[in-house]
Image (cartoon, rainbow, N blue to C red):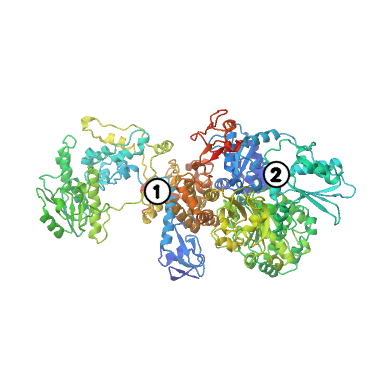
Amino acid sequence: MVKLRINNREVSATKGMTVLEAAARVGIEIPAMCHNSDAGHFASCMVCVVKDKGSSAYIPSCSAVVACGMDITTNSEELELARKTAVELLLSEHAGDCEAPCRIACPANMDIPLMNRFIAAGNADKALETVLKDIAMPSVLGRICPAPCEGACHRKGVDQPVSVCLLKRFAGDEGKIELKKAPPQAGRVAVIGAGIAGLSAVWFLQGKGFSSTLFDSNPLPGGALRYAIDQKKLSRQVLDRETGIILGSGVEYHPDTTVDRAGFDRMVKDYDAVVVATGDLTREIGEWGLANNGRQVAVDKQSHQTNIPNVFAIGNVNRTTKLAIRSAAQGKEVAFSIEQFLAGSEPQGEPKPFNSRIGRLLKHELPVYMKGVSSEARIEPPVKNGGSFDAPEAAREALRCMHCECLKPSGCMLRNLAQRYGASQRRFRLEERKPVKKTTDHDTVVFEPGKCIRCGICVRLAVKHDERPGLTFLGRGYDVEIAVPFEENIKVAIKKAGSILAEACPTGALSFKNGAQVKQP
Amino acid sequence: MKVQPGKIQKDVDEVIALSGKDKSSVIQVLQAIQDRYNYLPREALMRVCDTTSITPAEITGVASFYTQFRFEPAGKHIVKVCTGTACHVKGATLVHDAMAREMKLAPGRSTDDKRLFTLEKVACLGCCTLAPVVQIDDTTYGHVTANSSAGVLKDFLSRDGKKKKKKGVILPGGELQGEIRVGLGSCCIASGSSDIKDAVDAVVARDRINVNIKQVGCVGMCHQVPLLEVVTGNGGTEQSKLYAKVSPADIKSIVRSHFAPPGLLTRIRNGITRIAETIQTDDDWEGIERYSIDVREKHVASFLGNQIPIATEHRGVLDPLDLDDYIDRGGYGGLKRALGMESGEVIKEVAESGLRGRGGAGFPTGKKWEVAASQPGEDKMLICNGDEGDPGAFMDRMLLESYPFRIIEGMTIAAKAIGTSEGICYIRAEYPLAVRRIRQAIDMCIARGLLGDNILDSSFSFHIRIREGAGAFVCGEETALIESIEGKRGFPRIRPPYPAEQGLWGRPTLINNTETFAMVPYIMDKGAKQFASAGTNKSRGTKVFALAGKIRRGGLIEVPMGITIREIVEEIGGGIAGDRQFKAVQIGGPSGGCVPHYLSGTPVDFESLLDAGAMMGSGGLVVLDSGDCMVDMARYFLSFTQSESCGKCTFCRVGTRRMLNILDRMCSGTAKRGELEELETLAMQVRAGSLCGLGKTAPNPVLSTIRYFRDEYEAHLEGRCPTGKCKELITYYVDNECIGCTICAQKCPVAAIPFSPHEKHEIDHKECTRCDICREACPTGAVKVQ
């Protein structure tokens, strides 16, 4: 028995136990990333550092063995900062995107690569389900969106970007889903304005189980979509179909209802939350008591909360630039804010996961992304079909997607820790990033050494599972990397333990080709 | 060179038969393969994996870790530009760039198209007083400049292929007329002392003079090499004369002045520069500063006066490989005494001496031995750490080369004290002479019953093996060194368990630095009290330093602990050379820090140096003057540790790189406000969060220079380098002293100076690469730096 103190508590531990294990025994969690009990101790990432008060040294708790008289601190501002720095140092050399750049560029953060996978597989329904998680009116937006996603598409470096907007239109037009009623949540929400922002807010509020009431001064829903956009660009049938879906989701809808100052005040009292999505800031709305500068209502950028705590403002009432997809995105975000607000916590909008971003791909990095990807040129649909894809065209276009997304989007410990510590990838971006490397030759595993944190778990597990030649550390210092000895193919190097290695890898350096197999955290 | 596959198989099988088949032999196997092919052919490595238990992952992992190993054939000649501290402050980077230009190397390549030369940077050649130094194969050129680089290559090629003159034979008979001592430490050899030795042999043989020609170890006066000492007379009437910076051409006259009719002596004194006769000489003795005969002068006395030789006892008179000489002068007295004592008594004696580890951290040696001695089991190990890799420090090498018996004796005493019969001497691969000398010394000791079974007819046995490092600074760290001996990549282990409890192959292991072992025989022979009488209360005894930089007299010195920095710089070093001001000393190399001139009253002991933000380190001591940029110094040391990081833990692997990025940005004028604070924050975190000593101490040179020279950092943030050292922040221009001689225009390697005879020259700043050649070449000093 070894007696020591952890966070001022007396702890007894078994001889040979690590500090991490001793702490876990009494319910003290210490973050760890490079630790793997099957592969043995190594201590490389250093996010598990704790402080021994006696020596005032930092020690890696995952490998340091308990000793009598240790007086360990596991949580202090100093240690949190050190862990954050460790994560930021690793991120500074991380040559990989967490999400595909198209998704990052999309104001609604739509999972474009996943939609593409479903369309390529001929599954328009699943594609639509994917889209609707983030975007309320895909058929409408599939006709009017300027597609910032396509501007960010890495495929641009090869030829033309993937036709994401038309694929989304295809999903919206051709996919069918059944509306599922979400379990109801306590809270009544009033939404003023049935433009794309208000409709989107209603869609996501309903989706979260809140009962919402929609007020609009116009006789028909759609706001600027109906009254400002050319019919040739956006046919009224398409608009009616999608507003119909939203209004059919159980919302209480009051068209032809102009809200005045008194009405607004009543709503603020009668409803648990109010969403102002009126489009322009008219003089009258300007006098509702919402802080504004004469052109826009002042809101918190994340939550869209106004100076009146239960009132939120979205769409063009809080900004001047017209971008329908942004208004739609704010409709989704405000639903999160209201949910948080009604649960009694600080409204923050949709949680934004940490994203590692590498920026543009260099010419020589493109071939690796193009492996197994259709080399066909961007497909332009014939005009006779209203400029829409038919199913075979959509599938062919979706196969052009290079799938830049990480295959371990949620199982990546580095991403999760970056999120936890609010890490910045920019802090130490002081030199050119390392080259992106990706090997897809293996049957089940994708190897991306640029995402490696050099913990060597795979090297040791490969030895344990008798893989030959296996993997090795090559070089040293900053340039050390994990590689296959004698530059052999990874297919030859790892024959049996591929899944075990991908499972054990703390980042996306070794991941499953079929990302679905990744363990959720 | 194309090697036949069949031949490779046969070669490799031979190598394995000699070096061993087990995993821990992998480094020796790789070294042997590289010895044969000059690089590591892939087929050879695969053959090793096919015929031994060494796996592909192990062999590629290990081979790529150590810098000694090459994966591509190298050029016929290896050009090593020393980038040690002393060479750095004297412009080694400019020399390296100039060499690359002369060899017409493609960017990123180190071997020229014709495979004639391969250009390498080397951490330290240990000839700091000849800085900047370039070594081509076995020939060393000192005081090389960017301007003279072309000449050095030309000179080497003109010498290459010429057969070495046959050595003279000494004829016996008659009474000894005296002794001629030639320093044959690495630094002496680098300055040409083996040619001197050959010349002495030749002239002595030809003149049939009966003198004893003796090669002696390092005298420490490296600023005067090559050194020649002539002792005349016998039995109490000896007279000694020391000649400094001699050249082979001088030898005949020098020897004859002592052992031949007078007359000649006068000639030398009157004008050595116009000696008519030459012996086996190459007239273009280029590169190294030419001779100037120097009789015993006052400054020799003050150089040696403040020193106390313990580790370097009998320096300058002891033949490194003459065991009788060593024993006659009291050698092995310590071991004899230890053999008659109980283990505990030996440890007590060492503990009482107050000796602390000389590797840098200063852990009490007696305590370390006690822990090792108290471990159960018969299979303990003892290791002598001779993996000195600090740029600008070469104490260990000098000790191993000049006093091999003393180190072996020290190890033997330690082995007796802790109770082990197995020892390993781990020596840096870059020290071939040290390896050779220790190997020969071990054989001699075995033959004499001083090593091996039943030493001096006692029941105590002790065996020493040699292991050569393969080029990794981190292996100076004891746990990384152990990994290396086990045939692995030099990744440090987590302590505890300490090596004394669980070290090499899991056995209790005592590791001490070379210098520590060199102190032990003195302590055992003369007693703890005698040793402790030198030094301070907490830091007893002496410390060996490599003194270099901008001082008049550099070299290896052994001084009592507690001596002040000022005494070392002013009295031993003779103050700053040239007309600049003393600015700071850098102590402890990449783990140490800078102590500014106004703190030069700081005593040199473990604690005082730590308080001043420096560290004893391994003992490099580089003096800086007002022309040295402290930001550049910090960058220099950090770039060293950064490139030597093993790559295991994040703070060291990436953290030191990011610190270096910031320093690079400062030195190139691209850093922004706030980056100095970021550098400090990161430095503190790297210090706290790194796993081993390398990472923990790497920020020291940065933090200590920020502490004392913050204004220089701030100037760099404003785009100024106050000392004009940082290339990107300076411009070269020609002032009115220009006489229009066109030399600069002819010398400029990038044609940045238009050819305009009899007119004032202009430098095109866009083309200028700031290589410094024009400034050096200008006969009137008209090229200036702004």
Could you tell whether A223 is left or right of A69 in the image? left
Up-down: is B538 above or below B756?
below
Q: Image quarter for residue B416?
A: bottom right
Looking at the picture, tell me which residue is in the foreground, B705 or A177: B705
State the image coordinates of residue A198 (x, y, percent, origin top left): 18, 49
- Badge 1 density bin: few <14, some 14–19, many ≥20, Cα 10 Å: few
Indicate the amino acid at tag 2.
Ser
Q: Secondary structure at mark 1?
A: loop
Indicate the amino acid at tag 1.
Arg
Up-down: is B658 above or below B353?
above
The CA distance from mark 2 to mark 1 is 50 Å
Residue at 11% x, 52% y is: A259
Cβ–Cβ below 8 Å for labels 2 and 1?
A: no
State the image coordinates of residue B495 (x, y, percent, origin top left): 55, 61
Looking at the picture, tell me which residue is in the foreground, B128 or B479: B128
Marking on residue B191: 2
State the image coordinates of residue A370 (x, y, percent, origin top left): 39, 37
Marking on residue A411: none
State the image coordinates of residue B784 (x, y, percent, origin top left): 55, 39
Residue at 85% x, 57% y is: B236
Marked residue chain, label 1: A
User: Visible in this render: residue A251?
Assistant: no
Q: Residue furthest right?
A: B174
Q: Are marks 2 and 1 on the same chain?
A: no
Looking at the picture, tell me which residue is in the foreground, A198 or B403: B403
Tell me the residue that label 1 is attached to: A426
Q: Residue furthest front?
A: B736
Up-down: is A346 above or below A283?
below
Looking at the picture, tell me which residue is in the foreground, A294 or A13: A294
